Amino acid sequence: MNDISMLSAAVAILGAVLGVGVFLVSPSFIKSNPDRLKIGNYASIGFVLAFIALSVTSYFAPPLVQSVKNDVIVPLSNVPVPIRVPAPQERTQPIDETYSSNSDLWNKTARDYIRRFPATPGYRIKEIKFELEKFVHAEDIRTGVNRDGTEAYLLFRLTAGSQSDRHIGQIRGRAILIEVPIGSP
């Protein structure tokens, strides 16, 4: 407490004691001294002093209360604090690609594809699986995850026939990404 708060608290207590004390003593004082100043004036002065002191105290008290509010409360070390860790999640991405160039008259043509899948924010990709539903003239199907787990990929090659052959390359399936929260093994 600062000096002004202590002084105003002392004045408030003194004013309250004076006001209450005068009311308790007043009947005997009035009977024995009827010609003196009325006792009610002393009580009024005591209550006015108490009101002023309390007003001054309340003016200076908010900074004290705010300093207590801004303190950091540190939990005891032996009290267990539950930490909710998000569970691993599985995310599915559909794949449906067709290649039907047929631009060469006599030779078949091929095209390489790469599909990239970024990790969900707050997660890293641990594994990718590819479930194949249908494939025609598809080859070199590979999956992978980069080192830090921020992205997975699916690589494949589709081949289309020549203009005389007219076959198409097609792949259909699902890429299944297994994601874990960042920081978990």
Image (cartoon, rainbow, N blue to C red):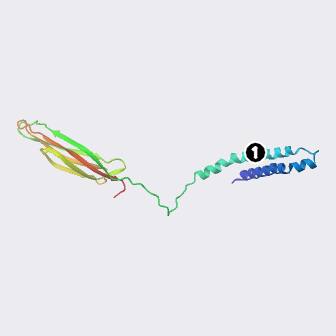
Q: Would you identify the image quadrant in which residue 173 lies? A: top left
Number of labelled discs?
1
The quadrant of the rendering that contains the C terminus is bottom left
166 above or below 138? above
Left or right for 168, reference 3: left
| Mark 1 element type | helix
Left or right for 39, reference 117: right
Q: Amino acid at mark 1?
A: Phe
Point out residue 47 in the picture as x, y percentages from the top left corner: 79, 45
The structure residue drawn at horizontal position 69% and vertical position 46%, both measured from the top left corner, is 58
**Nearer to me, 162 or 14:** 14
The structure residue drawn at horizontal position 22% and vertical position 48%, both measured from the top left corner, is 154
37 above or below 126? above
**Nearer to me, 127 or 90:** 90
Mark 1 neighbour class, 10 Å CA radius: few under 14, some 14 to 19, many 20 or more: some
**Nearer to me, 104 or 20:** 20
Point out residue 155 in the picture as x, y percentages from the top left corner: 20, 47
The quadrant of the rendering that contains the N terminus is bottom right
Q: Residue furthest bottom?
A: 78
| Residue bearing the label numbered 1 | 51
Q: Would you identify the image quadrant in which residue 113 lies? A: top left
The structure residue drawn at horizontal position 80% and vertical position 52%, both measured from the top left corner, is 17
